[in-house]
Amino acid sequence: QVQLVESGGGLVQPGGSLRLSCAASGSTFSINAMGWYRQAPGKQRELVASITIGGTPKYADSVKGRFTISRDNAKNTAYLQMNSLKPEDTAVYYCKAGLLVGGEIRGGTWGQGTQVTVSS
C-alpha cells in the first residue's frame, strides 16, 4: 500500500504561480509513475501531468509550457510547478501514484486533494 500526502495549493491571481508537492511512502516499489489529476466543478477528472520513475514527463495540452512536473526519487516526492495560471486552472488537484498504462495512471493510490483557485 502506498500513502500520499499532498501540500501546496491555495488562491492566486491570474498569471501567478503555485507549487504542489506529493510525498509517497509505504510500498513505493509497486509504482512506476506519479502525477496530478484535476477536477473542476461539473467536469470530469483529467490527468494534468505525469512523470515516470525514469523522469519522463507528460502533460495535458492545456498546461504545456506553463506547468512543470518533477520528482525526487530519493525522497519519493513529486512536484508540480504551475506558472502563468489561468482562471480555468481552478480545480481540486489530486496526486496519484501507480502504474502508467496507456497514458493514464492505473490502480495505485490517490492523495487527499488540494484546492487551487485562480481569481482576481
Image: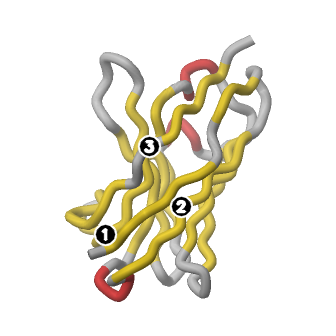
Marks 3 and 2, the one that precedes in the sequence = 2
- Is label 3 in a helix, a strand or a loop? loop
- Is label 2 in a helix, a strand or a loop? strand
What amino acid is at disc 3?
Gly
Q: Nearer the viewer, mark 1 or mark 2?
A: 2
Q: Nearer the viewer, mark 1 or mark 3?
A: 3
What amino acid is at disc 2?
Cys
Residue denoted by label 2 = 22
The image shows residue 4 at horizontal and vertical percentages of 43, 63
Q: How is the image coloured?
A: secondary structure
- Is label 1 in a helix, a strand or a loop? strand
Q: Are marks 1 and 3 in contact (CB under 8 Å)?
A: no
Q: Which mark is residue 98?
A: 1
Label 3 to label 2: alpha-carbon separation = 10 Å
Q: On screen, 39 above or below 61?
A: above
Q: Which mark is residue 113?
A: 3
The image shows residue 48 at horizontal and vertical percentages of 46, 46
Residue at left 30%, top 62%?
109
